[in-house]
Amino acid sequence: MAQQNDNVNHPKHYTSDPSGVECIQITRWRNFNVGNAIKYLWRAGLKDDPVLGHKAKTIEDLRKAIFYIQDEISRLETQK
């Protein structure tokens, strides 16, 4: 886990999990859609937005996770 808040390489909303695991350590082993869904679930509630506000940003991240999950289901359903 990163020891400092590095907004480019190790943003706090991806490194602050109590497990000590950084989000990228998990998502790099998944495909794009599953990795992105995990990423948005991981950070939901941890990232504020000065325009949207905390609650709306959390909802936005959860909706993004749903989008990637639905896209992965569609990809698998159409795969031969």
Image (cartoon, rainbow, N blue to C red):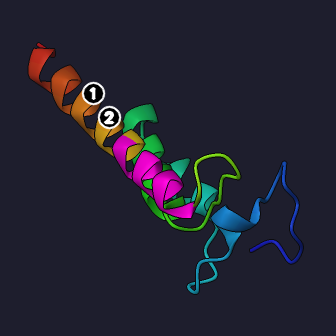
- Quadrant assignment, res 5: bottom right
User: From the viewer's perspective, is residue 42 above or below residue 78?
Assistant: below
Q: Quadrant of residue 35?
A: top left
Relative image position of residue 51 (x, y in whole percent): 66, 46
Q: Tell me the SS state at disc 1.
A: helix
Q: Residue at x 88, y 60 (%)?
A: 6
> Which residue occupies 47% across, 42% down?
36
Marks 1, 2: nearer the viewer: 2
Q: Nearer the viewer, residue 78 or 55?
A: 55
Please name the amino acid that badge 1 sits on.
Asp
Left or right side of 67 for 3: right
- The magenta segment: 54-63
The answer to whether the residues at label 1 and label 2 have Cβ atoms under 8 Å apart is: yes
Which amino acid, by three-letter code, is at mark 2?
Phe
Dot 1 corresponds to which residue?
Answer: 71
Residue under numbered circle 2: 67
Dot 1 surroundings within 10 Å: few (below 14), some, or many (20 or more)?
some
Q: Using the image, tell me which numbered label, if any, was put on residue 59.
A: none
Image quadrant containing the N terminus: bottom right
